[in-house]
Image: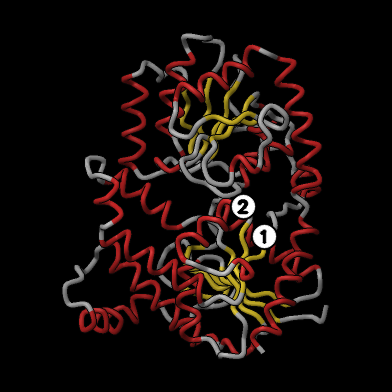
Amino acid sequence: MVNLRILLVSYYPMPHVGGLWTVVNNLQNELTRLGHEVDVLAQTESLTEYRILGQEAPFKIADVRPYIEGEIAAAYPNLESGSWIHTTEVLRYSLELTALATGLDQYDVIHAQDVIAASSIERVKPTHIPLVTSVHGYLTKEIFLALQGIYPNKSAEELYSSFEYQYHEHIEHIGCHVSEFIHTQADITKISLIEQHRIPENRFVQFPYGMDITSFRSTQPQLDNIPVKTKPIILFVGRLVQLKGVHTLIEALYQLKSHTTDWECWVLGDGYEEAIKRFTDLMEDRGLLSDIRLLGSVTNVKDFLETADIFVLPSLQDTQPHSVMEAQLSGIPVVVSNAGGLPEMVQEGVTGLVSEAGNPASLANQLARLLEDANLSKQIASQAQAWANQQWSLVNMGKNTEDLYKKAIPVSN
């Protein structure tokens, strides 16, 4: 394939601890290895500006905020300044202005990494440059679950009809429909988007993420922050939010104690202070403060995986999290929920165990199976590792992405 100039663009901050940055970083490296020139346009971690990674930002968000807020106030006089939607609009238009200042006509293809970025870039890009979008998560489902956490006493119908939900559904609709092609990793994501937004199936391209498996395995150990292991370790890695099913995990561990007390749970990840307090209060209420360790965000997740005995991810919504990929490659048995694309990553009883999302009893039962059956645990770990070595190939991801660009460029031109 002829060498291309490619822009990967995200509404969200990069670099940033988490799966999205891992995906984008891996993709940039692999496309560069294949001979392409690849830039990444994203927000800084300080949330103060958008810029091309490695370059200075053309301006700070604060510099253009008065102009943007004036336009928003004129168009939507009832939108409260500083609200969730207002902030999203400020950031969206900051991204648009940064893209204009950067000059999009230098690229052969623009690859949005979320539907919010796609909805913004489409408004300012030259018409002859194709826009493709990778949907790394099902935005409206995630927004619904976030709203459930904020407003636990509201009915589903009230949440679906809320301004916050309707706004994000509209953004998702625009982001999908303006893209020449939509890349999904999980079949369930494609099905959900087709049903909700009436997108033709031939606009979808599906292939899994990839990892630099050799680099992952050759990472030098950093063991200074690994606690002393005195019992079998159940490991959770993810944001400390309701979406990741942390509350389900705590309730499941409470029930697991009636099966066995020969375990300890390590939790890696950060969250908002109020969320951590809520989970800590639940742990205290269930008498689990000595059984669960909240260890915060770490850079050496691989070392924790190699120390642990079980990996658990009871998400209420997820697509294809890197934490599960890394656990499989590390040869550790995984227990995931049946939410989103997770059951597409795990064959029940063969490459992992699957519990019912939001069901603590189901999760406790699956954890107990692995803790009480060493042979099952070892067999699942071995089979998952062999499967993951083939499934999570970064080379395949790069080739599949090139093929996506080939499809999109003739469509646009």
Q: Is residue 74 left or right of residue 170?
A: left
Residue 206: which disc? 1
Residue 234's place in the image compared with 206, above or below, is above
Query: Quadrant of the image for the C terminus?
Result: bottom right
Q: Is residue 215 left or right of residue 190?
A: right
Q: Nearer the viewer, residue 365 or 6?
A: 365
* Residue appearing at x 71%, y 71% in the figure: 404
Which residue carries the number 2 mark? 186
Tell me residue 88's x, y (percent): 35, 67
Tell me residue 186's x, y (percent): 62, 52
Tell me residue 273's x, y (percent): 33, 42
Residue 209 found in image quarter = bottom right
Residue 403 found in image quarter = bottom right
Report how many numbered discs are placed on residues in the image: 2
Tell me residue 352's x, y (percent): 67, 31
* Residue appearing at x 57%, y 69% in the figure: 200
Element class at badge 1: strand
Direction left: furthest residue = 78
> Which of the two labelled residues, at mark 2 and mark 1, occupies the earlier sequence position?
2
* Residue appearing at x 30%, y 54% in the figure: 160
Q: Nearer the viewer, residue 69 or 303?
A: 69
Instruction: Say whether marks 2 and 1 touch (CB < 8 Å).
Output: yes
Residue 164's place in the image compared with 274, above or below, is below
Q: Identify the amino acid type marked 1.
A: Gln
Q: Is residue 50 left or right of residue 208?
A: left
Q: Identify the amino acid type marked 2.
A: Ala
